[in-house]
Amino acid sequence: MTVIYAIIVLGILIFVHELGHFLLAKLMGVGVEKFSLGFGPKLIGKKIGETEYLLSAFPLGGYVKMTGEGGYIEGGEIHNPGGVDTIPADELPHETLHELSDVEKARSFAHKPVLARIAIVIAGPVFNLLFAWLIFIVLFMVGVPTVTPKIGEVLKDKPAARAGMQKGDIITAINNMPISRWDQIAEGITASKGKELTLSVKREEREVSFTITPEPRESKNLFGEKVNLYAIGVASAGEVVTESFNPFQAFIRGSEQTWKVIDLTFMSLVKMVQRVVPMDSVGGPIMIAKMAGDMAEAGGASFLAFMALLSINLGVLNLLPVPVLDGGHLLFYVMELVFRRPVPQKIREYAQQIGMVLLLGLMVLAFYNDIVRYFVTRQG
């Protein structure tokens, strides 16, 4: 079942990504010859109108083949324009290259204005980000597990204990700002920068308040880096409730959550380049399959949240300025806008080759880490 869940997740995310390219291509008047989920040999396919819709053997990607992609002849010269995603070699029949007719030129991706090409290319990653955003909004409307602000332990000789706070107290506000979740307590205390705080607390059936000055403490962030925070010396009771929101609140919370994950994804990439995050943390298909299975067992909400997280990662990674990725094509088109002429074909071809080597290297690293993580380590 784990493999099935992974195929479902990847299939949906790839479909959303390629749908973005497909819809914007149609909107910009570009002909779409093929829409494929997966690479390699065709498993099934059906042609509807001008487009052949395919399900291919290898589910780790997909592509949209547009009119003019794969090469054409113009002015007696062979042109091999870049497109969106990576078209497999067997989808580039150079022996059938021909001079594009006026009708084909009008519907060719390569002959569209640069802004139209940018819109088509960026649509794939943007659709992945929008898809995650919609998932988060729906999850907040349906209900998400939330840790309540109930105190489970008051640490001895810490600010909270000295002020008189007790186990079982429920923090309801910090400096008159209402509190309903445990994470809001940490945020409020950290934001104080050590300044005096007024905490409103519900104790049994009465309301009491405490004036507390947080004390500094050293901790580690998500990347294992040492950071200076502030604390008052309380621990959560671990009480969890399901909290749901109206559509407007869910829109706000979903937007905030989407931005947090996007920011975290970018920061993770930066920390990886800085060698703060080790390269053995990179995961591949086996890790995705394992996590998909675990999240499916945890419940529908966890599975959807995992899909949203993966969709954001796919969108962000595709925006990186690496040739063969959407971000690499965007870089060329931005340069075309700036210099008012296309990047020479030879430069694009060399860049594509370098990009392919980098991508293959990353894939090898991911597979290697998966094998060590799930097979070698466990056997040891």
Image (tube, grey):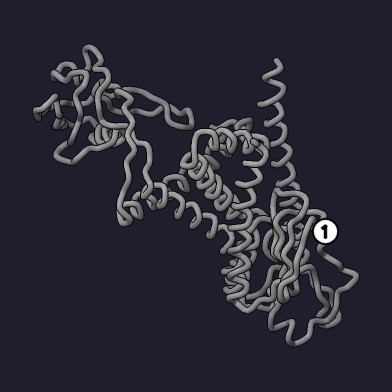
| Residue 137 in sight | yes
Could you tell me residue 295's position as x and y percent? 53, 36
Could you tell me residue 292's position as x and y percent? 58, 38
- Helix, strand or loop for disc 1: helix
- The amino acid type of the residue labelled 1 equals Ala
Could you tell whether 284 is left or right of 166 in the image? right
Which residue of the protein is positioned furthest toward the right in this rendering? 95
Q: Which residue is more in the foreground, 135 or 332? A: 135
| Residue 33 in sight | no
Q: Does residue 280 lie above or below 233 as drawn?
A: below
Q: Does residue 378 lie above or below 140 as drawn?
A: above
Picture quarter containing residue 191? top left
Could you tell me residue 353's position as x and y percent? 77, 54
Picture quarter containing residue 205? top left
Q: Which residue is more in the foreground, 238 or 125? A: 238
Which residue of the protein is positioned furthest toward the bottom in this rendering? 102
Could you tell whether 107 is left or right of 165 in the image? right
Identify residue for label 1. 89
| Residue depicted at 21% across the width and 21% down the height | 168
